[in-house]
Amino acid sequence: MGNISGQENNLPVQDLDGNKEPEIIADFFTGGAHCCTYSLIYRYDNKSQKYLKIRHEWGNGGYQLKDLDKDGLPEFDSRDDRFAYAFTAYAASAYPLQIWHYRQGKMVDVTRRYPKLISNHASELWQTYTQARQEGDDGKGFLAAYLADKYLLNQGQDGWQRVQQAYKKSDRTKFFADLRKFLRETGYIK
């Protein structure tokens, strides 16, 4: 857990937002087969002279702190856990990339600012999909996450064409309708 990537420091103290005042991250695991992790992030508020906290749910995933844009402030490199179980069993679920900033006491989804990372992630998902198909999996979980990544890149139409060409099972009409509805509900399709 902690930095929820296996690192030893389970209580990092680090300036997450560039205001010269360090924040404290406390990571927790609720228990269970593969769920759930969350973080409490504390920041000192000069006005009230108290520590204020927010809670951010990571679900099955977690995060890694990385300075992805090399600006001296870390991002939370994660995945969108809403895709767990959405179209298949947990073990065959896949997840679109999700990147967060902590700013002024709030977590902000900044994934779309990293098109190269999203593109690489989409390519990895497609490769995993083709491997899963060779092993007998229908690949729905991988296709769903792949298509979400394509929408993050503003390439939804291209993504749909590829998914529709790839998925030919008898439930394709229902799968595509469910997938479109899910992507709309989760904000990938605007």
Image: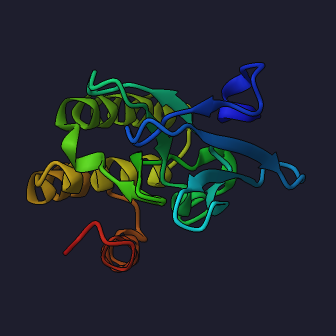
Give the x, y percent position of residue 117.
Answer: 27, 30
Looking at this view, is 6 or 185 the one in front? 6
Which residue occupies 60% across, 46% down?
92
Relative vertical location of residue 165 with respect to residue 188 in this rendering, above or below: above
Which residue occupies 22% across, 53% down?
152
Q: Is residue 120 visible?
A: yes
Which residue occupies 30% across, 74% down?
180
Looking at this view, is 75 or 50 the one in front? 50
Give the x, y percent position of residue 23.
Answer: 58, 42
In the picture, measured across the screen, residue 90 lies left or right of residue 176, that is right
Q: Is residue 165 visible?
A: no
Picture quarter with the C terminus: bottom left
Instruction: Say which quarter of the image contains residue 156.
Output: bottom left
In the picture, measured across the screen, residue 32 lies left or right of residue 61, that is right
Give the x, y percent position of residue 172.
Answer: 36, 68
In the picture, measured across the screen, residue 3 lies left or right of residue 169, that is right
Relative vertical location of residue 82 with respect to residue 3 in this rendering, above or below: below
Give the x, y percent position of residue 35.
Answer: 77, 53
Which residue occupies 60% across, 58% down?
84
In the picture, measured across the screen, residue 70 lies left or right of residue 25, that is left
Picture quarter with the N terminus: top right
Relative vertical location of residue 61 with respect to residue 74 in this rendering, above or below: below
Looking at this view, is 158 or 166 the one in front? 158
Relative vertical location of residue 148 with respect to residue 69 in this rendering, above or below: below
